[in-house]
Amino acid sequence: MHLNDASMSGSKTFEAVARATLLRMTPLRWRLVRIFESLMQFLKPLIPPLRPFKNPKEQPASILAIEYWNLGDLAILVPFLRNLRQSFPRARISLLLKAELTAFLEDQGLVDEFIPVRVPWARHFNRLRKYNPFSLDWISLSRTILSLRKRRFDLAFSGRMDVRDNLMLWLSGARRRIGYSVGGGGSFLTDRVTPDLSRPHRAELWLHLLEALELPLDPKVDRFHLTHVELAWARSYLAGLGIAPGVSLIGVHPGARIATRQWGNERFAEVARRVLKETDAHVLWFSEPGNSCQSPQLGRCHAVSLSFRLFLAVLSYCRLLVCNDSGPMHLANLLRLPVVAVFGPTQAEWFGPRGSHDRVVIRPEFSCRPCWDYCVFDQPYCLRTISTDEVYAAVKAALGTRDIGKPGKVSAC
């Protein structure tokens, strides 16, 4: 049965519009997806049939959510998980995710079980390595899917609009499988949700799955909770840097997982220099542990390299984070911390920050966006043409020219 029927629901025209609007999928790629989906149909007779889900009002005992990509994707998932927990407080919720990220949502009360998985196409950037048939990741993935199938989940969700995810939902053996068919794989779902084209952000697409099940949504439950111990540690750490309580802190995180999303350390350093010159704020220059990135040698600029949860605790004391389109941008949103995000190859409407005080610096004239991080030029000019003046103007706009140097408040609870 189709959920959220609209006048164009199920029509080829609507699905083509949705693919163009939400996925930017070319006709060639769509033909390849259809060929893959047709080939996968040969699996169905080889696999025992699934138990039917006869009563849509039945309260599920077990629920599976699939999100095996990166840190920012998990951060986008948090509002969905909090609303899912509110709707089914007694259900056992399991999350299939990348093995390295299982610590992210611990102690948040969102998930009862983290199921680590190694998915080849989500682990490698190189296209050849993604689908290398000799990779041991395929064996690991097969074992994980077999273990899922034994669990017989009542509900399973994926909000990715990806034929591969829909196939994984079907292979999991879940009785009711909720997702989008516009990217292919609709035959693997029991509930094919019609996307809302007016709400293209990936967080909204996840939430729309719950709306399609006629479940109530609370837009305010999107926050990340830090413990009192973590916050106390952060205060002690800042004191050790010589930063007195109440001093205004501006965070700068110049890193990004993919090179084509990196605006450049020198440019971020210039923004930091202007902040320090024109205000009395301190700058926290964040980098990943083990990263060789050096902080600018400036007064009141402090190099900070911490483990994940401690990074969040220190970040929560900042008034603003200046960063690339990256995981830290989404984490700042969960802490209700304003951000200035420099965007290059991706769509801000899909993955951008969503706070009322957030600012996105982007050059909209580049029609090649989104390029899915495979730049067609010798370098990402969509980023290179963004000036430090533009970014610093966004910093001033985010905080206000009169109070940029005033002390901030801890944004975590």
Image: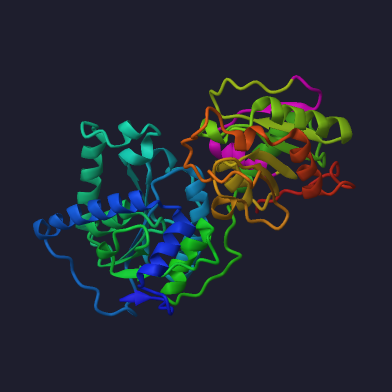
Q: Which of 5/319 is in front?
A: 5
> Can residue 314 be seen at all in this image of the molecule?
no
Residue at 21% of width from left, 44% of height from top?
143
- Membership of 304 in magenta stretch: yes
Residue 213, image x, y percentages = 41, 74
Residue extending furthest toward the left: 46
Residue at 48% of width from left, 62% of height from top?
205
- Placement of the N terminus among the 4 image quadrants: bottom left
Relative to 361, say whether 288 is above or below.
above
What kind of colouring is applied to the model shown? rainbow
Q: Which of 412/269 is in front?
A: 269
Q: Which of 315/19 is in front?
A: 19
Residue at 18% of width from left, 52% of height from top?
39
- Membership of 296 in magenta stretch: no
- Placement of the C terminus among the 4 image quadrants: bottom right
Residue 86, image x, y percentages = 48, 68
Residue 216, image x, y percentages = 50, 75
> Can residue 231 be seen at all in this image of the molecule?
yes
Rendered image quadrant of residue 275? top right
How many marks the image carries: the answer is 0
Residue at 57% of width from left, 33% of height from top?
380
Judge from the rendering whether residue 38 lies leftward or rightward of residue 346; answer left or right: left
Residue extending furthest toward the right: 402
Relative to 132, say whether 176 is above or below.
below
Residue 390, image x, y percentages = 76, 40
Rendered image quadrant of residue 295? top right
Which span of residues is magenta-colored?
Answer: 297-316
Judge from the rendering whether residue 248 lies leftward or rightward of residue 101; answer left or right: right
